[in-house]
Image: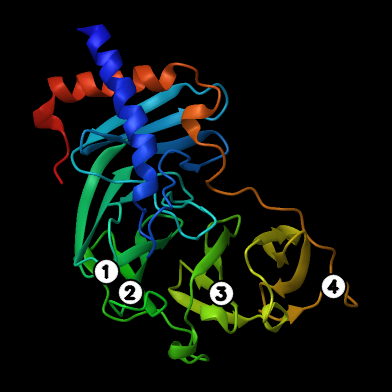
Amino acid sequence: MVFRLLLLGLALVAAGLCAGAARADGLPVLGIDVGNTGVTTPQVRYVTLPLQGNTLVAQVEREGGSVLQRRALRGRFTIPAVAFDGSADGLSTDGHTLVLIRPRIAFPRTETAFAVLGADRLRLRARVTLRGDFSFDALSPDGSLLYLIEYLSPRDPTRYQVRVYDVNAGRLLPDPIVDPGENAEEMRGYPLTRVASPDGRWAYTLYDGNGEHPFVHALDTTSRKAHCIDLDALVGLDLADTGLSLGAGGKTLSVRVGPEPVALIDTRTFEVREPGAAGVEPAPAVSEPRGGGTPWPLVGVGGGLLLLAAGALAMALRRRRKLAPT
């Protein structure tokens, strides 16, 4: 029986790793799935793997790969991606809340589902199903506010608005988050990369501006406010290799295209300056990403993933009634 479970576990893992390329984890395109690379803290990594139409969620030590917690959820969910470079999110800064999203199989979709878990023991707290097409955007530091991208056109995924879901109240707030100084119609495009402030309050996302005028969307996840920062220096450039990094204790945001920074943003005033200008600090060191990188099953855990999948399968077979519903 154990041998059969191990073989089936291996098949499930292989199928899950291959299936990821055919789906997406919330963004309006297919082919971006960060479930097996996960989202991280300095100590642990949270990952998701398909398990016969259900989901295995695991908390894994970053050093050594020991599995600390695991949970089987009924239905398919995955770690959210927030940008095309594979930036991952879904974990609150206080480490207590983990949000998963149902993978996308087409655009648009008529409803979007999320699972809210306690990050310590991976217990399901809430199941959220919204009418319409959404993707995950950010989470407030205490996990009480879930920020979503709502797609407004079934044919144009660059038309969107930012919405807020109150996790404690269990409802989608009516008013979108907008920068009062910008025309909402001009703030369009695809998210290229993301970095968050050290305290998790600010989420900075670089958008391509729908191929016209790139900008950084600075979202204050605590006060429900946003600022759009135009980046003239990026107009006309190839944005295939872009990056954001924070320095000076989070006071300076560096925008990189290729190996060199092309713009520096003061995160207190949102003023944009050229690198090397008088009074401008040197380009900051690259901030550690919350997710992405080499898929966890391939990093230093040997046969641990196989045993994890088999163990989760056995647990699912023994405790079907205790699985969280979709």
- Alpha carbon separation for disc pair 4 and 2: 38 Å
Where disc 3 sits, the SS reads loop
Per the image, the residue denoted by label 3 is 208
Q: Reading the chain from its start, which is encountered first: label 3 or label 1? A: 1
- Alpha carbon separation for disc pair 3 and 1: 21 Å
**Label 3 CA crowd tier, 10 Å (few <14, some 14–19, many 20+):** many
Per the image, the residue denoted by label 1 is 108
Amino acid type shown at disc 3: Asp
Where disc 1 sits, the SS reads loop
Per the image, the residue denoted by label 4 is 280
Amino acid type shown at disc 1: Pro
Say which of 43 and 190 sits in front.
Answer: 190
| 162 relative position to 287: left or right | left
Instruction: Tell me the tag on residue 151.
Output: 2
Q: Nearer the viewer, mark 4 or mark 3?
A: 3
- Alpha carbon separation for disc pair 1 and 2: 8 Å
| Res. 319 image quadrant | top left
159 shown above or below 1: below
| 23 relative position to 298: left or right | left
